[in-house]
Image (cartoon, helix red, strand yellow):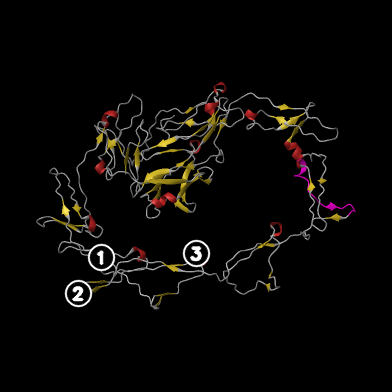
Amino acid sequence: VLPNGNLAFPAFRAEDYRQEVHAQVYVCLARNSVGSIHSRDVNVRAVVQQFYQTEVNNEYVIRGNSAVLKCSIPSFVADFVTVISWQNDSGDIYTRTEANSNQDDFVNQYYEAEVVSEYVIRGNTAVLKCNIPSFVADFVKVEAWVGSEGTVYLPSSNYVVNQFYEAEIMTEYVIRGNTAVLKCSIPSFVADFVQVEAWIANDGEVLVPSTQNYVVAQYYVTEAENEYVIRGNSAVMKCKIPSFVADFVAVEAWIGDEGEIHTYSTCVAVLRSRRHNEYVIRGNSAVMKCEVPSFVADFVVVEMWLDSTGNTYLPGSDYVVHQFYQSRVNDEFVLRGNTATVKCLIPSFVADFVQVIEWITDDGSFSAASASTNNYVVHQFYQTRVIDEFVLRGNTATLKCLIPSFVADFVQVVEWVTDDGSFSTAPNSITNYVVNQYYEAQVYDVFVIKGNAAVFKCNVPSFVSDHVEIIGWEDTQGNRFLPPSDYVVTQRYEVNVMDEHVLRGNTAIIKCHIPSFVADYVFVSSWLENEKTEIFMDGNHYDGKYLVLPSGELHIRDVGPEDGYKSYQCRTKHRLTGETRLSATKGRLVITEPVGSSKPKFPTGIRAHIAYRTTYRITSRLNHPIPINFHIPGFPCPFLQYT
């Protein structure tokens, strides 16, 4: 098991083959604070170079008949071995290619078709079947039937089998006065060709389907249950219609005990909304809310407000809530001569509507407007440093100019000067300086079965990999192999997207798993949501909810319950062939509710267990936060997470 959690199977000798290891089903277990999950089954089957022999058994056949010989391949290599040719004792070779291109080889095998006797009552229909032996059934078809008198019957679409059948009517029991439905039962073997034309009663009355709209009048009773309500409150009565007529019956009116009729046109719904008292300090702003009962909230809107003195307030776009607020400026302590930054603190409830337009000192002697045409630049003192580098005589040395981070975005190196001033070089100089650094490229041995394809890799040291490229290969015999522009090894691969667990409201990252052997040539071009919505790498989607990171992961912000019903697939593209393909599996978000309300804390004494410290400087080109995981070897899950 590698440090990153991957399970690796190294090369092994044939005698070291173990079935419980090399022919086994594996699953991985992932676990975090939310729970654990198993992966899909992974079937591992190792292939070894193993001795085998094929056999051809004797076949006994009558002279003149056809014979079929079979090449028996041992089962342990049957999946990897195919027959490419046959050879007889005289040395004659028979291959599939020769048979297909130079000869018309067909196995002429004797067979007999049989017609089994069928017993049938006189006047009924009979069906005769031609039984063809199964070993030639794929190549033989019936062309015609010949009667004993020599009559020939050819297949045609005009033949109709006249088969006797009887339709039945089942007895239906029904209460007098109720409606009855009778059904004509037609045998299934003729149901596709027979339809009901008419019904005939015992007295000879014929009922024929016509264009008239027949309606089955079925007795039903509606009910209105008692509703208990406090005097003065509103009551809602419901008319219960039986389900078997609910699609055809509608309420037209309500009738009271005294005979009064209430229809939709004359019915007035009495609705009382409520409003709670709001307590507010004099001079401050107050917001009143009209609470509408939920059962009518979809049909009721607030048209106006009415105060106790009779004044009415109508909704409009010109109303602005004027709310009192105060901005604050905290004291900043700074050394004399240094630069100070003062911040104006605006209350959050008005931060969206208030902006800083000017700064004024206590005595009014200085005023700086945000929209001023003057370009204010904060001049801050800083020092650059160059750390000593130790290097062997004759080797290459690289010196780095360390610029303080608070001015790194505004300061650049324009020149290097030695102590005595004897050497000066500027980055923009016409002279092209190149650091000549010694390096060695290495090619490791690759083990492969004879006849299979092998892929060699040239390992270039990382410190020069950006400036070195492979221009050719050379073997021990001096043969050179130049990389042609149109040579691409097409290798089958599949990309997968796994389910990701995330807490509601957090950010989720879904990763497209690309096999390592093609990871250098395949990249994620887009993501597909629910098999229809394409999410590309360039730009925000759904107001910044989705973002495809440069590394190919799909970044989903503010995960909600509705995101758990969506599926995600990644679309990859091969850099060399241009081939695009969707991931073989679809990933989903498994969303759980956060448990507990306390903030995460570090255990006491955690520093004693960390034997090293790593400093990261991360520069983001994005305009919104991205999650960054810091992994510590030996820990099963991310140790820290920053945004």
Marks 2/3: CA–CA distance: 52 Å
Q: Residues within 10 Å of mark 2 (few under 14, many from 20)?
A: few
Residue 35 placement: quadrant? top left
Q: Which residue is mark 1?
A: 275
Question: Magenta region: which residues?
Answer: 135-150
Classify mark 3: residues with Cα within 10 Å, few (<14), some (14-19) or many (20+): few
User: Front-most of 284 and 345?
Assistant: 284
Discs 2/3, front = 3
Quarter of the image where the N terminus is located? top left
Q: Amino acid at mark 1?
A: Arg
**Residue 530 can be seen in this image:** yes
Report if residue 78 lies within the magenta region.
no
Classify residue 257 by image quadrant. Answer: bottom left
The residue singled out by tag 3 in the image is: 243
Q: Amino acid at mark 3?
A: Ser
Q: Which residue appears at 41% of the width and 51% of the height?
A: 563
Using the rendered image of the protein, determine whether residue 549 is visible from the camera's viewpoint: no
Where's residue 165, x and y in %?
74, 60
Q: Which mark is on residue 309?
A: 2
Q: On screen, 148 above or below 487?
A: below
